[in-house]
Image: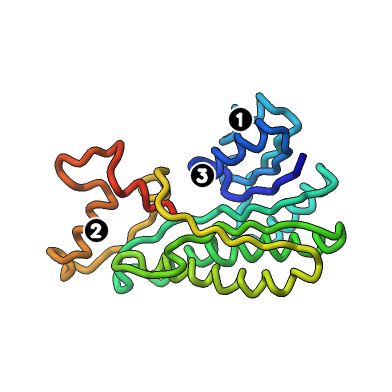
Amino acid sequence: MKTWFITGATGGLATAIISELLERGDRVAATTRKKDALATLKEKYGTQLWVTALDLTNPQAVSDAVDQTFQTFGTVDVLLNNAAYGLYGTVEGISAKQTADVFNVNVFGSLNTARMFLPHFRKQGSGQIIQIASMAGQYSTPVMGMYSASKWAVEAAFEALAAEVAPFNIQTTIVEPGGIRTNFVDGNGVFGEDPIDYQGTEVEKIVRLMKGDVPGMDRSSNVRKVYRR
């Protein structure tokens, strides 16, 4: 049996992982934006699942949640940094605030959580960090520039961190998913306000496809749902 701390535990990839972990007997501390989001699993698994609402952009809140998790379970074996969201549009059309917001969650939120865990992992003599990155952390395409930039930053920071903490028996794994059919785009994605000059270009076609704004497109199986990470 292992004990996990999982961020961004609402919907998509995280819910599937949590369900599998609980089914096999592991314990899970799950953080979400809405504390009641995992009510069904909580009712089924009881104290095996601990859930709290958490703003990853608030370092003190992250510290409190991590400390409370160790107080509740005594030990944590794995930190799964899963929380992130997509930001899509032209580099020109995405605002400075939108850019700051996506970096605050995707990059600084992950770093905040890892930083809070490291003293605990060193104290217990072991631990594993699993950082969900993206194939988009290896390349960039039109409309995905700022999202890819956030994932490139994640890759760079956690590659360095992996080497730094290895002497403490802390293992780091960076996972780079490709397309997964979730609501990552249509449920949680944010879009910039692209200038009118981009109408009729490849940018407009991609944005319309991602938003599902294409006549005759099957919304249950369209390609926009595979832009998971």
Asked if labels 1 and 2 touch by Cβ distance under 8 angstroms, the answer is no
Most distant residue in the left direction? 200
| Quadrant location of the N terminus in the rendered image | top right
- Foreground pick, 61 / 221: 221
Q: Which residue is mark 3?
A: 13
The vertical placement of 136 against 83, above or below, is below
Which residue occupies 29% across, 68% down? Answer: 142
Kindly identify which numbered label has been placed on residue 39: 1
User: Disc 2 on helix, strand or loop?
Assistant: helix
Asked if labels 3 and 1 touch by Cβ distance under 8 angstroms, the answer is no
- Place residue 187 in its image quadrant: top left
Which residue occupies 72% across, 74% down? Answer: 164
- Foreground pick, 4 / 175: 175
Place of residue 68 in the rendered image (x, y in percent of width and height, measured from the top left): 78, 48
Place of residue 109 in the rendered image (x, y in percent of width and height, measured from the top left): 60, 61
Looking at numbered disc 1 in the image, what kind of residue is underneath it? Ala
Looking at numbered disc 3 in the image, what kind of residue is underneath it? Leu
User: Disc 3 on helix, strand or loop?
Assistant: helix
Looking at numbered disc 2 in the image, what kind of residue is underneath it? Ile
User: CA–CA distance between discs 2 and 3?
Assistant: 24 Å
User: CA–CA distance between discs 1 and 3?
Assistant: 17 Å
Which residue occupies 86% across, 57% down? Answer: 124
Place of residue 165 in the rendered image (x, y in percent of width and height, measured from the top left): 74, 70
Kindly identify which numbered label has been placed on residue 206: 2
In primary-sequence order, the first of circles 2 and 3 is 3
Which residue occupies 25% across, 66% down? Answer: 194
User: Disc 1 on helix, strand or loop?
Assistant: helix
Q: Nearer the viewer, mark 1 or mark 3?
A: 3
Mark 1 crowd level (few <14, some 14–19, many ≥20, 10 Å Cα) = few
In primary-sequence order, the first of circles 2 and 1 is 1
- Place residue 154 in its image quadrant: bottom right
In primary-sequence order, the first of circles 1 and 3 is 3
